[in-house]
Image: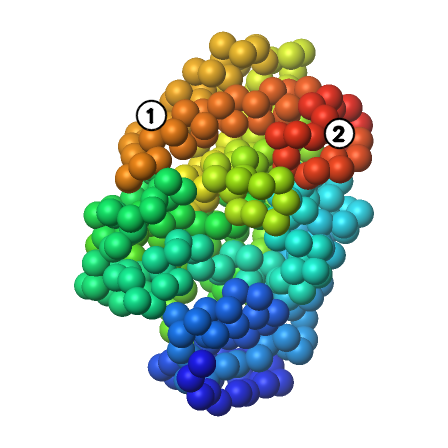
Amino acid sequence: MNRFDYLRPASVAEAISAGRKPGSAYLAAGTNLLDLMKGGVARPALLIDITRLPGLDGIEVLPNGGMRVGALVRNSDLAYHPVFSKRHPAVAEALLSGASAQLRNAATVAGNLLQRTRCAYFYDTASACNKREPGAGCDARDGENHLHAVLGWSPECIATHPSDFCVPLVALDASVEIEGPTGSRVVPLDSFHRLPGSEPQLETVLSPGELVVALHLPASAAGYAAHSRYLKVRERTSYAFAVVSAAASLRLEGGVVSEARLALGGVALKPWRARAAEQVLAGRACDEAAFAEAAEVALADAKPSGDNAFKIELARRILVRALGLAAAGTPDRMPALPGSVFAQPEGLALHA
Protein backbone atom coordinates (compact mmCIF):
# COMPACT_ATOMS: atom_id res chain seq x y z
CA MET A 1 0.00 0.00 0.00
CA ASN A 2 1.31 3.44 -0.91
CA ARG A 3 1.73 6.23 1.61
CA PHE A 4 -1.17 8.69 1.64
CA ASP A 5 -2.44 11.75 3.47
CA TYR A 6 -5.67 11.62 5.46
CA LEU A 7 -8.27 14.37 5.88
CA ARG A 8 -11.51 14.43 7.87
CA PRO A 9 -13.50 17.42 6.56
CA ALA A 10 -16.15 19.13 8.67
CA SER A 11 -18.52 19.93 5.80
CA VAL A 12 -19.53 18.79 2.34
CA ALA A 13 -18.03 21.98 0.91
CA GLU A 14 -14.67 21.25 2.55
CA ALA A 15 -14.76 17.67 1.28
CA ILE A 16 -15.47 18.80 -2.28
CA SER A 17 -12.67 21.37 -2.16
CA ALA A 18 -10.23 18.64 -1.11
CA GLY A 19 -11.68 16.18 -3.60
CA ARG A 20 -10.65 18.38 -6.52
CA LYS A 21 -6.99 17.65 -5.83
CA PRO A 22 -5.43 15.07 -8.18
CA GLY A 23 -5.02 11.67 -6.55
CA SER A 24 -7.73 12.19 -3.92
CA ALA A 25 -10.42 9.65 -3.05
CA TYR A 26 -13.47 9.79 -0.80
CA LEU A 27 -13.57 7.21 2.00
CA ALA A 28 -16.75 5.95 3.67
CA ALA A 29 -16.86 2.34 4.91
CA GLY A 30 -13.98 1.41 2.61
CA THR A 31 -15.30 -2.13 2.03
CA ASN A 32 -14.12 -1.95 -1.59
CA LEU A 33 -11.60 0.91 -1.65
CA LEU A 34 -9.36 -0.47 1.11
CA ASP A 35 -9.16 -3.85 -0.60
CA LEU A 36 -8.10 -2.12 -3.81
CA MET A 37 -5.47 -0.13 -1.93
CA LYS A 38 -4.05 -3.20 -0.22
CA GLY A 39 -3.65 -4.89 -3.59
CA GLY A 40 -2.04 -1.85 -5.20
CA VAL A 41 -4.94 -1.43 -7.65
CA ALA A 42 -5.96 1.95 -6.19
CA ARG A 43 -3.17 4.27 -5.01
CA PRO A 44 -4.76 7.52 -3.79
CA ALA A 45 -2.45 10.23 -2.46
CA LEU A 46 -5.20 11.67 -0.24
CA LEU A 47 -8.05 9.89 1.55
CA ILE A 48 -10.96 12.17 2.44
CA ASP A 49 -12.96 10.60 5.26
CA ILE A 50 -16.60 11.61 4.75
CA THR A 51 -18.10 9.31 7.39
CA ARG A 52 -18.82 12.13 9.84
CA LEU A 53 -20.24 14.67 7.42
CA PRO A 54 -23.59 15.93 8.71
CA GLY A 55 -26.85 15.30 6.87
CA LEU A 56 -25.81 12.33 4.76
CA ASP A 57 -27.23 9.48 6.85
CA GLY A 58 -30.97 10.11 6.75
CA ILE A 59 -33.90 8.29 5.12
CA GLU A 60 -36.86 10.56 4.42
CA VAL A 61 -40.19 10.63 2.62
CA LEU A 62 -40.32 13.74 0.45
CA PRO A 63 -43.35 16.02 0.09
CA ASN A 64 -43.86 14.75 -3.47
CA GLY A 65 -44.16 11.18 -2.17
CA GLY A 66 -40.71 10.06 -3.26
CA MET A 67 -37.92 8.95 -0.95
CA ARG A 68 -34.47 10.43 -0.39
CA VAL A 69 -31.74 8.17 1.02
CA GLY A 70 -28.53 9.76 2.27
CA ALA A 71 -25.22 8.58 0.82
CA LEU A 72 -23.95 7.32 4.18
CA VAL A 73 -26.98 5.19 5.06
CA ARG A 74 -25.80 1.65 5.75
CA ASN A 75 -27.08 -1.10 3.47
CA SER A 76 -28.62 -3.10 6.29
CA ASP A 77 -30.33 -0.04 7.80
CA LEU A 78 -31.96 0.70 4.45
CA ALA A 79 -33.00 -2.90 3.82
CA TYR A 80 -34.74 -3.11 7.21
CA HIS A 81 -36.19 0.41 7.24
CA PRO A 82 -39.96 -0.12 7.82
CA VAL A 83 -41.12 2.45 5.26
CA PHE A 84 -38.49 1.84 2.60
CA SER A 85 -38.73 -1.96 2.69
CA LYS A 86 -42.52 -1.84 2.32
CA ARG A 87 -42.46 0.69 -0.54
CA HIS A 88 -39.52 -0.88 -2.37
CA PRO A 89 -39.37 -4.59 -1.44
CA ALA A 90 -37.28 -5.64 -4.46
CA VAL A 91 -34.60 -3.12 -3.51
CA ALA A 92 -34.57 -4.46 0.05
CA GLU A 93 -34.36 -8.02 -1.28
CA ALA A 94 -31.44 -7.08 -3.53
CA LEU A 95 -29.59 -5.47 -0.62
CA LEU A 96 -30.05 -8.52 1.59
CA SER A 97 -28.87 -10.87 -1.17
CA GLY A 98 -25.49 -9.15 -1.37
CA ALA A 99 -22.29 -9.66 0.64
CA SER A 100 -22.45 -10.82 4.27
CA ALA A 101 -24.34 -9.38 7.23
CA GLN A 102 -21.11 -7.88 8.57
CA LEU A 103 -20.40 -6.07 5.30
CA ARG A 104 -24.00 -4.88 4.94
CA ASN A 105 -23.73 -3.36 8.41
CA ALA A 106 -20.74 -1.30 7.27
CA ALA A 107 -21.22 -0.64 3.54
CA THR A 108 -22.99 2.53 2.46
CA VAL A 109 -25.54 3.40 -0.20
CA ALA A 110 -23.14 5.59 -2.19
CA GLY A 111 -20.34 3.07 -1.81
CA ASN A 112 -22.57 0.40 -3.32
CA LEU A 113 -23.27 2.59 -6.35
CA LEU A 114 -19.56 3.33 -6.77
CA GLN A 115 -18.05 -0.10 -6.18
CA ARG A 116 -15.58 -1.27 -8.81
CA THR A 117 -15.80 -4.36 -10.98
CA ARG A 118 -14.70 -7.68 -9.51
CA CYS A 119 -12.94 -8.75 -12.72
CA ALA A 120 -9.92 -10.80 -11.61
CA TYR A 121 -7.69 -9.15 -14.20
CA PHE A 122 -8.57 -5.71 -12.85
CA TYR A 123 -7.51 -6.87 -9.37
CA ASP A 124 -4.30 -8.52 -10.60
CA THR A 125 -1.71 -5.80 -11.15
CA ALA A 126 0.42 -8.24 -13.15
CA SER A 127 -2.34 -8.51 -15.78
CA ALA A 128 -3.10 -6.05 -18.57
CA CYS A 129 -6.23 -4.03 -17.82
CA ASN A 130 -7.41 -0.97 -19.72
CA LYS A 131 -9.60 0.04 -16.79
CA ARG A 132 -6.66 0.11 -14.40
CA GLU A 133 -4.07 1.36 -16.93
CA PRO A 134 -5.54 2.86 -20.12
CA GLY A 135 -3.95 1.43 -23.24
CA ALA A 136 -2.48 -1.62 -21.49
CA GLY A 137 -4.86 -4.09 -23.13
CA CYS A 138 -7.42 -6.53 -21.69
CA ASP A 139 -6.15 -9.93 -20.59
CA ALA A 140 -9.71 -10.99 -19.82
CA ARG A 141 -10.45 -11.21 -23.55
CA ASP A 142 -8.34 -14.36 -23.89
CA GLY A 143 -8.47 -15.42 -20.25
CA GLU A 144 -10.94 -16.84 -17.76
CA ASN A 145 -14.03 -14.90 -18.79
CA HIS A 146 -17.12 -17.03 -18.23
CA LEU A 147 -18.48 -14.44 -15.78
CA HIS A 148 -17.90 -11.42 -18.02
CA ALA A 149 -20.26 -9.16 -19.97
CA VAL A 150 -22.68 -10.15 -22.71
CA LEU A 151 -24.21 -6.69 -23.22
CA GLY A 152 -22.60 -3.31 -23.84
CA TRP A 153 -19.00 -4.55 -23.79
CA SER A 154 -16.23 -3.33 -26.05
CA PRO A 155 -12.86 -4.74 -27.24
CA GLU A 156 -11.23 -2.62 -24.53
CA CYS A 157 -13.21 -4.03 -21.57
CA ILE A 158 -15.60 -6.93 -20.94
CA ALA A 159 -16.02 -6.49 -17.18
CA THR A 160 -19.37 -6.37 -15.36
CA HIS A 161 -20.76 -4.15 -12.63
CA PRO A 162 -21.10 -6.13 -9.38
CA SER A 163 -23.97 -4.38 -7.56
CA ASP A 164 -27.22 -6.13 -6.66
CA PHE A 165 -28.68 -2.95 -5.17
CA CYS A 166 -28.40 -0.97 -8.43
CA VAL A 167 -30.43 -3.43 -10.52
CA PRO A 168 -33.92 -2.81 -9.04
CA LEU A 169 -33.00 0.85 -8.53
CA VAL A 170 -32.45 1.30 -12.27
CA ALA A 171 -35.72 -0.49 -12.98
CA LEU A 172 -37.58 1.91 -10.65
CA ASP A 173 -36.13 5.11 -12.17
CA ALA A 174 -33.89 6.01 -9.23
CA SER A 175 -31.64 9.06 -9.51
CA VAL A 176 -28.41 10.21 -7.89
CA GLU A 177 -27.99 13.57 -6.14
CA ILE A 178 -24.50 14.98 -6.61
CA GLU A 179 -22.69 17.96 -5.07
CA GLY A 180 -19.59 19.37 -6.72
CA PRO A 181 -17.41 22.41 -7.33
CA THR A 182 -19.99 23.88 -9.71
CA GLY A 183 -23.06 23.16 -7.57
CA SER A 184 -25.57 20.36 -7.29
CA ARG A 185 -27.22 18.18 -9.91
CA VAL A 186 -29.43 15.09 -10.11
CA VAL A 187 -28.58 12.33 -12.60
CA PRO A 188 -30.78 9.34 -13.47
CA LEU A 189 -29.08 6.19 -12.20
CA ASP A 190 -29.49 4.67 -15.65
CA SER A 191 -27.13 7.39 -16.94
CA PHE A 192 -24.80 7.44 -13.94
CA HIS A 193 -22.61 4.46 -14.91
CA ARG A 194 -20.75 4.46 -18.22
CA LEU A 195 -20.35 1.59 -20.64
CA PRO A 196 -16.68 0.89 -21.42
CA GLY A 197 -16.46 2.06 -25.04
CA SER A 198 -12.89 3.17 -25.76
CA GLU A 199 -12.40 4.66 -22.28
CA PRO A 200 -13.18 1.96 -19.71
CA GLN A 201 -11.26 3.87 -17.03
CA LEU A 202 -14.19 6.35 -16.93
CA GLU A 203 -16.77 4.44 -14.91
CA THR A 204 -19.33 7.11 -13.95
CA VAL A 205 -20.35 10.62 -14.95
CA LEU A 206 -18.74 12.10 -11.81
CA SER A 207 -16.29 14.94 -12.42
CA PRO A 208 -13.25 15.58 -10.18
CA GLY A 209 -14.37 16.64 -6.72
CA GLU A 210 -18.00 15.63 -7.16
CA LEU A 211 -19.56 13.74 -4.28
CA VAL A 212 -22.68 11.58 -4.22
CA VAL A 213 -24.83 12.89 -1.37
CA ALA A 214 -28.13 11.03 -1.80
CA LEU A 215 -30.20 8.58 -3.76
CA HIS A 216 -33.76 9.43 -4.85
CA LEU A 217 -36.67 7.14 -5.67
CA PRO A 218 -39.74 8.72 -7.29
CA ALA A 219 -43.21 8.41 -5.79
CA SER A 220 -44.25 6.24 -8.74
CA ALA A 221 -41.79 3.52 -7.66
CA ALA A 222 -43.95 2.63 -4.66
CA GLY A 223 -46.79 1.73 -7.03
CA TYR A 224 -45.01 -1.51 -7.92
CA ALA A 225 -44.66 -2.74 -4.34
CA ALA A 226 -47.37 -5.42 -4.59
CA HIS A 227 -45.61 -7.20 -7.48
CA SER A 228 -41.89 -6.64 -7.24
CA ARG A 229 -39.02 -9.15 -6.95
CA TYR A 230 -35.28 -9.48 -7.33
CA LEU A 231 -33.72 -12.79 -8.29
CA LYS A 232 -30.04 -13.70 -8.48
CA VAL A 233 -28.08 -16.70 -9.75
CA ARG A 234 -24.65 -17.09 -8.13
CA GLU A 235 -22.00 -19.74 -7.97
CA ARG A 236 -22.72 -20.39 -4.31
CA THR A 237 -25.87 -19.62 -2.37
CA SER A 238 -24.47 -16.92 -0.11
CA TYR A 239 -21.81 -14.23 -0.15
CA ALA A 240 -21.23 -14.25 -3.90
CA PHE A 241 -21.73 -11.79 -6.71
CA ALA A 242 -24.38 -12.48 -9.34
CA VAL A 243 -23.57 -14.53 -12.42
CA VAL A 244 -26.79 -12.96 -13.68
CA SER A 245 -29.67 -11.30 -11.86
CA ALA A 246 -33.04 -9.74 -12.68
CA ALA A 247 -35.40 -7.22 -11.13
CA ALA A 248 -39.05 -7.34 -12.16
CA SER A 249 -41.72 -4.91 -10.99
CA LEU A 250 -45.26 -4.97 -12.34
CA ARG A 251 -48.51 -3.06 -12.11
CA LEU A 252 -51.40 -5.46 -12.71
CA GLU A 253 -55.05 -4.79 -13.54
CA GLY A 254 -57.21 -7.88 -13.62
CA GLY A 255 -54.27 -10.15 -14.35
CA VAL A 256 -53.05 -7.93 -17.18
CA VAL A 257 -49.79 -5.98 -17.06
CA SER A 258 -50.49 -2.25 -17.22
CA GLU A 259 -46.83 -1.32 -16.66
CA ALA A 260 -43.59 -3.24 -16.22
CA ARG A 261 -40.14 -2.24 -14.99
CA LEU A 262 -37.28 -4.64 -15.75
CA ALA A 263 -33.51 -4.66 -15.30
CA LEU A 264 -30.68 -7.18 -15.46
CA GLY A 265 -27.47 -7.47 -13.44
CA GLY A 266 -24.21 -9.30 -14.04
CA VAL A 267 -24.50 -8.84 -17.81
CA ALA A 268 -22.80 -5.47 -18.44
CA LEU A 269 -20.58 -2.81 -16.89
CA LYS A 270 -23.73 -1.10 -15.63
CA PRO A 271 -27.11 -2.29 -14.38
CA TRP A 272 -29.03 -2.96 -17.59
CA ARG A 273 -32.52 -1.50 -17.99
CA ALA A 274 -34.62 -3.60 -20.38
CA ARG A 275 -36.97 -0.91 -21.71
CA ALA A 276 -37.92 -2.68 -24.94
CA ALA A 277 -38.93 -5.76 -22.95
CA GLU A 278 -41.11 -3.59 -20.71
CA GLN A 279 -43.06 -2.46 -23.76
CA VAL A 280 -43.60 -6.06 -24.84
CA LEU A 281 -45.40 -6.79 -21.57
CA ALA A 282 -47.70 -3.74 -21.56
CA GLY A 283 -51.29 -4.88 -22.01
CA ARG A 284 -50.37 -8.58 -21.91
CA ALA A 285 -51.71 -11.28 -19.63
CA CYS A 286 -49.31 -12.63 -17.02
CA ASP A 287 -48.38 -15.87 -18.69
CA GLU A 288 -45.26 -17.80 -19.63
CA ALA A 289 -45.51 -16.86 -23.31
CA ALA A 290 -45.48 -13.12 -22.59
CA PHE A 291 -42.63 -13.47 -20.11
CA ALA A 292 -40.57 -15.56 -22.56
CA GLU A 293 -41.09 -13.02 -25.35
CA ALA A 294 -40.03 -10.18 -23.06
CA ALA A 295 -36.90 -12.09 -22.09
CA GLU A 296 -36.01 -12.68 -25.75
CA VAL A 297 -36.32 -8.96 -26.43
CA ALA A 298 -34.31 -8.05 -23.32
CA LEU A 299 -31.36 -10.16 -24.53
CA ALA A 300 -31.76 -9.51 -28.26
CA ASP A 301 -28.50 -7.56 -28.48
CA ALA A 302 -26.49 -9.88 -26.22
CA LYS A 303 -23.36 -11.57 -27.54
CA PRO A 304 -20.60 -13.53 -25.84
CA SER A 305 -17.41 -11.71 -24.91
CA GLY A 306 -15.58 -14.99 -24.38
CA ASP A 307 -16.52 -18.35 -22.93
CA ASN A 308 -19.82 -17.05 -21.61
CA ALA A 309 -22.56 -17.70 -24.17
CA PHE A 310 -24.42 -19.63 -21.46
CA LYS A 311 -25.05 -16.33 -19.62
CA ILE A 312 -27.39 -15.16 -22.36
CA GLU A 313 -29.74 -18.11 -21.98
CA LEU A 314 -29.34 -18.01 -18.19
CA ALA A 315 -30.31 -14.32 -18.15
CA ARG A 316 -33.40 -15.06 -20.25
CA ARG A 317 -34.49 -17.80 -17.87
CA ILE A 318 -33.85 -15.81 -14.71
CA LEU A 319 -35.87 -12.88 -16.08
CA VAL A 320 -38.78 -15.19 -16.90
CA ARG A 321 -38.62 -16.61 -13.39
CA ALA A 322 -38.39 -13.16 -11.78
CA LEU A 323 -41.45 -12.08 -13.76
CA GLY A 324 -43.36 -15.13 -12.59
CA LEU A 325 -42.48 -14.39 -8.97
CA ALA A 326 -43.43 -10.74 -9.34
CA ALA A 327 -46.76 -11.68 -10.92
CA ALA A 328 -47.48 -14.05 -8.02
CA GLY A 329 -47.10 -11.12 -5.63
CA THR A 330 -44.54 -9.73 -3.24
CA PRO A 331 -44.26 -12.03 -0.19
CA ASP A 332 -45.59 -10.68 3.09
CA ARG A 333 -42.14 -11.27 4.60
CA MET A 334 -38.62 -11.40 3.24
CA PRO A 335 -37.61 -14.89 2.02
CA ALA A 336 -35.11 -16.70 4.23
CA LEU A 337 -32.75 -16.67 1.22
CA PRO A 338 -33.34 -13.20 -0.29
CA GLY A 339 -32.92 -13.10 -4.05
CA SER A 340 -32.22 -16.82 -4.24
CA VAL A 341 -33.64 -19.26 -6.78
CA PHE A 342 -33.90 -21.71 -3.87
CA ALA A 343 -36.35 -19.52 -1.93
CA GLN A 344 -40.01 -20.48 -1.80
CA PRO A 345 -41.71 -19.22 -5.00
CA GLU A 346 -45.12 -18.40 -3.53
CA GLY A 347 -45.94 -14.76 -2.84
CA LEU A 348 -48.75 -12.98 -1.01
CA ALA A 349 -49.79 -9.56 -2.33
CA LEU A 350 -50.05 -7.77 1.00
CA HIS A 351 -48.46 -4.48 -0.11
CA ALA A 352 -51.31 -3.33 -2.34
Residue labelled with disc 2: 331
Q: Residue at x 60, y 59 (%)?
A: 109
- Give how far apart the Cα atoms at labels 1 and 2 are: 31 Å
Quick check: 317 above or below 78?
above
**Residue 225 at what x, y percent from top left?**
69, 33
The quadrant where residue 349 appears: top right
Depth order, front residue of 138/278: 138
Judge left or right: residue 318 versus residue 97. Answer: left
Judge left or right: residue 348 versus residue 254. Answer: right
The quadrant where residue 100 appears: bottom right
Please, what is the three-letter code of the amino acid marked with disc 2? Pro
Residue labelled with disc 1: 300
Q: Residue at x 59, y 85 (%)?
A: 8
Which type of secondary structure does the marked residue at label 2 adopt?
Answer: loop
Q: Is residue 85 visible?
A: yes
Location of the N terminus by quadrant is: bottom left
Please, what is the three-letter code of the amino acid marked with disc 1? Ala
**Residue 221 at what x, y percent from top left?**
62, 38
